[in-house]
Image (tube, rainbow, N blue to C red):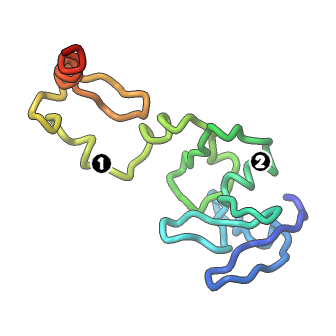
Amino acid sequence: MSDEFFYATRPKGGRTRTPLRDWIDASGDCWVWTGYTDKKGYGWVTRDGAPKTAHRYIYSVLVGPVPKELHVDHLCRVRSCVNPDHLEPVTPAENRRRGVSNPHNRSKTECKKGHPFDEANTYLRPDGGRGCRECQQIRERKSRK
């Protein structure tokens, strides 16, 4: 692991110059970020004066740069994990499809208007969500008028 120095943000402000390896607990399968984490569980660092998520930063240092349009998905589902073997750059839509943050929406059997979410009436939107074909047809008819 790199001995590169960087600044890690502390919860009450302030920064400290610490080697990269000192902010990671690599004793298990997941490499847990031990620096500052936000209320959602993601680690954060400050590098070159800008805040960055720890998992994205560590991935870019150890594997290579991640295009801005991609998200870095945690395959292990542990938000504080920075193990590059547990991370994969994916599109935002793919990241949402894989997510477990809102199982309530995935369990819905009907759209807001009461149309069924079945194979014939459902399509996958570009953002990863489900769309109702019947509602889409209604919107298209209204826009033609």
Residue at (61, 45) in percent of width and height: 72
Q: Residues within 10 Å of mark 1 (few under 14, many from 20)?
A: few
Residue at (26, 44) in percent of width and height: 105
Residue bearing mark 2: 60
On the image, the x and y values in percent for residue 2 come to 88, 59
- The local secondary structure at tag 1 comes to helix
Q: Examine the rendering and report whether any part of residue 119 can be seen.
A: no
Q: Nearer the viewer, residue 31 or 59?
A: 59
Q: CA distance from mark 1 to mark 2?
A: 30 Å
Residue 135: quarter of image: top left
On the image, the x and y values in percent for residue 117 come to 18, 28
On the image, the x and y values in percent for residue 27 come to 69, 66
Q: Examine the rendering and report whether any part of residue 17 can be seen.
A: yes
Residue 42's disc number: none
Query: In the shown orientation, is residue 137 left or right of residue 44?
Result: left
Q: Is residue 37 depicted above or below 68 in this figure? A: below
Give the quarter of the figure containing the C terminus.
Answer: top left
Which label's residue is closer to the chain start, 1 or 2? 2
Q: Residues within 10 Å of mark 2 (few under 14, many from 20)?
A: some
On the image, the x and y values in percent for residue 29 come to 63, 57
Give the quarter of the figure containing the N terminus.
Answer: bottom right
Residue bearing mark 1: 103
Query: In the shown orientation, is residue 135 left or right of residue 57?
Result: left
Question: For the view shown, which residue lies furthest in the front direction?
Answer: 145
Residue at (63, 46) in percent of width and height: 87
- The local secondary structure at tag 2 comes to helix
Residue at (80, 42) in percent of width and height: 64
Query: In the shown orientation, is residue 112 left or right of residue 53?
Result: left
Q: Is residue 78 depicted above or below 121 in this figure? A: below
